[in-house]
């Protein structure tokens, strides 16, 4: 049995806790947070877990085989470094770190120690992403040459750490960790350069950009675009893919109201003759990511998500931030996959 500790129990805490409970081979033995209400929530799911308010104490307790780190992004590297040094496997919330140098250091430490380090790229298990992935595998729109992903709307951003660029990495890092990972999974082709842009126009109570854009240009001319905007009074589709034989559009589910990102997009296939059809949603097995971790640790089954992939997502976001400083001029990303 793999003994799991939950380091920080914020918005994602219940999701991880429930997943561990439901996954054969995993058990939650400890939880660490400084807020009493979060500890109470954790114990409702895992009542036998030992409670800590000091993360160092939990990591040094020798209770853990695996820790799930859900702290703010600017602390990911330090807590991962500590856990690996104590012989603890690590699941890390996105992004892996705030720069490539930190990612490379953590990967080297994990390799040297013979430990698992993996980022919870949970959006690879979203049904809209899986539906698009199947459609591309089936070749229904031919060769994809243009890909757009959008998230946002028009509204005052929160004042939590997500909106603090020094903590979260900024608007590109916050949602880009999900959407750029999806792009890289669906379009794993040689990349020529990255362009990025951050616009500060209206929401001056936070340090994140109000509107951020990343453009990935491939060596054969394909392009993928990601936009995160808090100034989009009219939302673009979540996904829009153009292929040589048709297109895919991911429209926001109107049942979600003002929180459309909470529900999967509805994927429509438009064929070259103009005919349109809504594709049936493809769904992942429950808790597939956590099951893959258990399978790896207990049976050495290959992981579907690798640290190299998550590291390259950071490399693209870092290149986009560098490009944004020079008004979207092209920057070459430091990629392992090239």
Image (cartoon, rainbow, N blue to C red):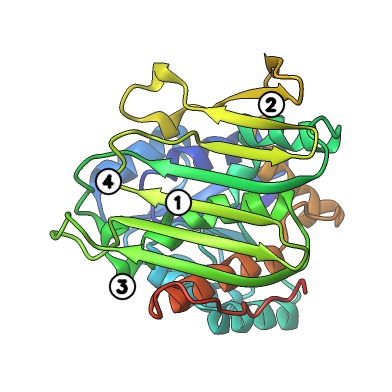
Q: Which mark is residue 283?
A: 2
Give whichever of 85, 80 is nearer the camera: 80
Separation of disc 4 and disc 3 at Cα?
A: 21 Å
Asked which quadrant contains residue 156, the reply is top left
Instruction: Please give the residue where the numbered disc 4 appears in the rendered image.
Output: 231
Residue 17 visible in the snapshot: yes
Mark 1 vs mark 3: give the one in front.
Answer: 1
Q: Are marks 2 and 1 in contact (CB under 8 Å)?
A: no
Instruction: Residue at 40% x, 50% y: name it.
Output: 228
Instruction: Please give the residue where the numbered disc 1 appears in the rendered image.
Output: 227
The extreme front residue here reads 273
Mark 4 vs mark 3: give the one in front.
Answer: 4
Sequence-first tag of 2 and 1: 1
Asked which quadrant contains residue 282, the reply is top right
Instruction: Residue at 78% x, 63% y: name it.
Output: 220
Q: Quadrant of the C terminus?
A: bottom right
Separation of disc 1 and disc 3 at Cα?
A: 20 Å
Q: Is residue 253 above or below residue 184?
A: above
Separation of disc 2 and disc 4 at Cα?
A: 31 Å
């Amino acid at each position: 049995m793999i003994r799991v500790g939950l380091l920080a129990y914020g918005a994602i805490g219940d999701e991880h806790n429930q997943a561990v409970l439901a996954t054969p081979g995993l058990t939650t033995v400890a939880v660490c947070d400084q807020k009493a209400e979060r500890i109470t929530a954790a114990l409702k799911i895992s009542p036998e877990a030992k409670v800590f308010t000091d993360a160092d104490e939990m990591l040094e307790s020798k209770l853990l085989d695996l820790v799930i780190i859900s702290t703010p992004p600017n602390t990911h590297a330090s807590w991962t470094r500590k856990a690996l040094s104590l012989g603890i496997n690590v699941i890390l919330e996105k992004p892996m770190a705030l720069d490539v140098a930190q990612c490379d250091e953590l990967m080297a430490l994990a390799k040297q120690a013979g430990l698992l380090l993996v980022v919870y790229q949970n959006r690879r298990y979203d049904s809209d992403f899986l539906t698009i992935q199947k459609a591309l595998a089936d070749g229904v729109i031919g060769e994809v040459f243009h890909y757009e992903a959008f998230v946002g709307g028009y509204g005052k951003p929160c004042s939590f750490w997500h909106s603090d660029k020094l903590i979260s990495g900024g608007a590109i890092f916050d949602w880009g960790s999900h959407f750029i990972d999806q792009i890289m999974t669906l379009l794993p082709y040689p990349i020529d350069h990255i362009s990025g842009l951050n616009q500060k126009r209206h929401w001056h109570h936070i340090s994140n950009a109000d509107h951020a854009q990343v453009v990935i240009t491939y060596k054969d001319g394909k392009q993928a675009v990601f936009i995160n905007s808090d100034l989009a009074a009219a939302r673009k589709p979540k996904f829009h893919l153009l292929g040589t034989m048709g297109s895919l559009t991911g429209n926001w589910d109107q049942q979600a109201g003002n929180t459309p990102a909470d529900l999967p997009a509805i994927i429509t296939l438009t064929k070259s003759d103009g005919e349109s059809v809504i594709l049936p949603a493809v769904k992942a097995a429950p808790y597939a990511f956590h099951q893959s971790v258990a399978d790896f640790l207990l049976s050495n089954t290959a992981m579907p998500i690798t640290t190299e992939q998550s590291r390259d997502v950071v490399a693209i976001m870092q290149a986009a931030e560098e490009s944004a400083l020079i008004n979207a001029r092209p920057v070459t990303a430091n990629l392992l996959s090239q």
